[in-house]
Image: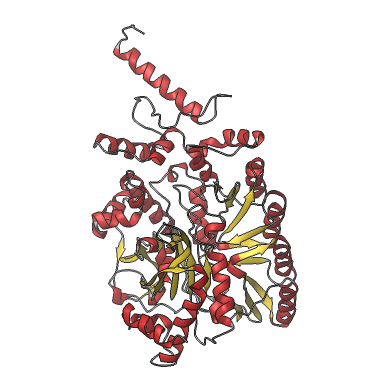
């Protein structure tokens, strides 16, 4: 403007413009437009408030001459939590988000899943995966009114609702809140749904009931804005040592209940062991840190770890913006030292031999009828075909939980659910009621361990119809071969590995398979074998590339038949069998046995 300002006037003007931008981002100026994509906030005074740590980390990256990814710029311009007023206006106008707003809406748990479906998907937050019957029935009502009339159980013991029209996103979120549920932070660069032992509090084997600790962490996240807008998503799980594992070793932070012996400088008893850096899609399981923490202190420790990640996680490369890569770059000791600095306290460390062997999970504990620690009561694991339930089935399950159980429905990472508190005398009645719903508590070893992500039907990243393929594998193999040991078959649509194909006995990851020299492709998979979790943890190895989807059931059948015919002993698992054969030798055995 040609006007010369004093230094004090310049500081005032900079602060005024910065404050105006912040107010606009928060929706405080009626009718104000969204920030222009790619724009940057003007120079301002040092960052303060709950977003300060993230903004300082962004500024440090730029000061080093490196470029922030688009998502980081979008969070600085307007954190998704501040977009709710505009999101409601979009709903009134009946339009879906565009540009950076697609990312921002995910902070509220709404995913615009075009071009696969011209609709939203909503992912909930259900701490430890446990709902009351009235909440479950309420979600069914929401699915009937505002979504596609069904729900899916996810591999984080969570629920997803799909086929939500542009007009219904905010009202769906508000109805969830009315049920005591939320989807806040269920997507984008946030701490995702916290998982725990699905039989927590009822399991005769467990060392610790994970419910209070998962719930404490859940509320801690919801109450603290500074824990939003991380460099990338973040997963935390609590495993109490029960009969059904929480797959905590696939999480960024895993808390494992362990028994610590006397004589190692800490009070003997049950502690949480800390494991860090799990991300199976990047070929890594969480690793033991040597640190143990008193269970009531787990939230405080997780908070410090997340804050170190906020300060130092990669904001220039989305592929490297996970905790694993910070651990790889720093090493565990440097990272733990930074965590101690955040905590203002020294972490407890004990040698591996101070910890008793953990109880072994039952790989079929999530299906069928199992006695609880409460005399005369049982949990019933209900089989859900690839995790899908209709509204009618949801209402029926809620009624069974209310009338014949303790009122709880417990979701598992195996994409099914558990009805708890069922009296011995009511088991036949529960099974009859399930049958009336088209469901069952019985499953073959193949179907019991079948996991599939959404795939190409509902995800833009999916290269194949994973749920369709999983069903085809189950139907084909169940008719042709009897399996007498547990088997996990994980079918995922892309490299993001939502179905965690690398930890399955057999894992299939979606791929476009070339079928002509002109570049034509069809749906297909690369096939992985030898994965595992818990005490049997391992990342699987590739056995086949470019298997057409239509051929996948036959390929899986051949592998299962060779295992059953050639295993070294009746107790040799499929993982053990495939691990003692090199891929080339294993392929030769399958081909030799083919008709």
Q: Horizontal and vertical percent for residue 427? A: 70, 80
Q: Nearer the viewer, residue 470 or 109?
A: 470
Q: Which image quarter: residue 143?
A: bottom right
At x 32%, y 44%, the residue is: 316
Seen in the picture, residue 223 relative to 244 is either above or below; the reply is above
Q: Quick one: which residue is furthest to the top in this view?
A: 3
Q: Quick one: which residue is furthest to the bottom in this view?
A: 569
Q: Is residue 408 left or right of residue 481?
A: right
Seen in the picture, residue 478 relative to 239 is either above or below; the reply is below
Q: Is residue 11 left or right of residue 561?
A: left
At x 34%, y 6%, the residue is: 3
Q: Horizontal and vertical percent for residue 358? A: 41, 77
Seen in the picture, residue 163 relative to 552 is either above or below; the reply is above
Q: Is residue 482 at all visible to an observer of this figure?
A: yes
Q: Nearer the viewer, residue 463 or 201?
A: 463
Q: Horizontal and vertical percent for residue 13? A: 38, 16
Q: Give the total of numbered labels.
A: 0
Q: Horizontal and vertical percent for residue 439? A: 68, 73
Seen in the picture, residue 401 relative to 359 is either above or below; the reply is above
């Amino acid at each position: 403007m040609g006007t010369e300002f004093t230094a004090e006037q310049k500081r005032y003007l900079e602060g005024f413009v910065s404050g105006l931008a912040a107010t606009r981002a928060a929706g405080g100026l009626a009718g104000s437009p969204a920030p222009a994509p790619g724009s940057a906030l003007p120079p301002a005074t040092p960052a303060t408030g709950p977003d300060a740590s993230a903004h300082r980390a962004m500024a440090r990256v730029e000061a080093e001459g490196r470029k922030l990814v688009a998502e980081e710029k979008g969070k600085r311009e307007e954190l998704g939590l501040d977009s709710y007023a505009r999101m409601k206006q979009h709903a009134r106008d009946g339009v879906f988000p565009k540009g950076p707003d697609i990312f921002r809406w995910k902070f509220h748990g709404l995913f615009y899943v075009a071009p696969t479906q011209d609709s939203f998907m909503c992912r909930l937050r259900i701490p430890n995966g446990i709902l009351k019957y009235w909440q479950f029935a309420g979600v069914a009502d929401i699915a009937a009114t505002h979504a596609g009339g069904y729900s899916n159980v996810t591999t984080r013991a969570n629920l997803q609702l799909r086929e939500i029209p542009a007009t219904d996103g905010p009202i769906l979120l508000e109805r969830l809140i009315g049920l005591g549920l939320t989807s806040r932070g269920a997507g984008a660069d946030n701490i995702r749904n916290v998982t725990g032992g699905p039989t927590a509090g009822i399991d005769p084997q467990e060392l610790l009931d994970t419910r209070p600790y998962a719930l404490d962490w859940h509320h801690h996240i919801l109450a603290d804005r500074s824990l939003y807008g991380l460099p990338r998503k973040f997963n935390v799980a609590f495993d109490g040592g029960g009969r059904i594992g929480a797959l905590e070793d696939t999480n960024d932070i895993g808390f494992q209940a362990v028994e610590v012996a006397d004589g190692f400088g800490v009070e003997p008893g049950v502690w949480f062991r800390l494991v860090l850096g799990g991300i199976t899609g990047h070929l890594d399981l969480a690793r033991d840190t040597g640190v143990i923490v008193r269970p009531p202190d787990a939230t405080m420790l997780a908070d410090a770890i997340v804050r170190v990640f906020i300060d130092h996680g990669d904001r220039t490369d989305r592929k490297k913006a996970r905790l694993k890569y910070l651990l790889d770059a720093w090493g565990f000791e440097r990272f733990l030292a930074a965590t101690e600095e955040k905590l203002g306290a020294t972490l407890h460390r004990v040698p591996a031999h101070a910890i008793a062997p953990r109880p072994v999970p039952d790989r079929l504990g999530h299906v069928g009828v199992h006695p609880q620690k409460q005399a005369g009561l049982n949990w019933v694991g209900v089989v859900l075909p690839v995790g899908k339930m209709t509204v009618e089935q949801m209402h029926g399950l809620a009624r069974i939980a209310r009338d014949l159980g303790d009122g709880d429905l417990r979701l598992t990472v195996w994409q099914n659910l558990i009805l708890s508190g069922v009296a011995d005398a009511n088991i036949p009645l529960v099974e009859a009621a399930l049958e009336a719903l088209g469901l069952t508590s019985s499953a073959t070893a193949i179907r019991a361990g079948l996991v599939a992500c959404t795939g190409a039907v509902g995800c833009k990243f999916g290269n194949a119809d994973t749920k369709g393929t999983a069903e085809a594998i189950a139907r084909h193999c169940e008719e042709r071969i009897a399996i007498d040991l547990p088997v996990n078959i994980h079918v995922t649509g892309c490299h993001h590995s939502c179905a965690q194909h690398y930890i399955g006995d057999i894992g299939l990851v979606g791929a476009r398979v070339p079928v002509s020299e002109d570049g034509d492709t069809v749906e297909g998979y690369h096939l992985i074998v030898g994965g595992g979790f818990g005490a049997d943890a391992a990342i699987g190895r590739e056995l086949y590339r470019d298997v057409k989807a239509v051929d996948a059931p036959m390929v899986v059948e051949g592998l299962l038949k060779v295992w059953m015919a050639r295993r070294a002993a009746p107790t040799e698992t499929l993982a053990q069998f495939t691990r003692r054969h090199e891929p080339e030798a294993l392929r030769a055995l399958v081909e030799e046995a083919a008709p």
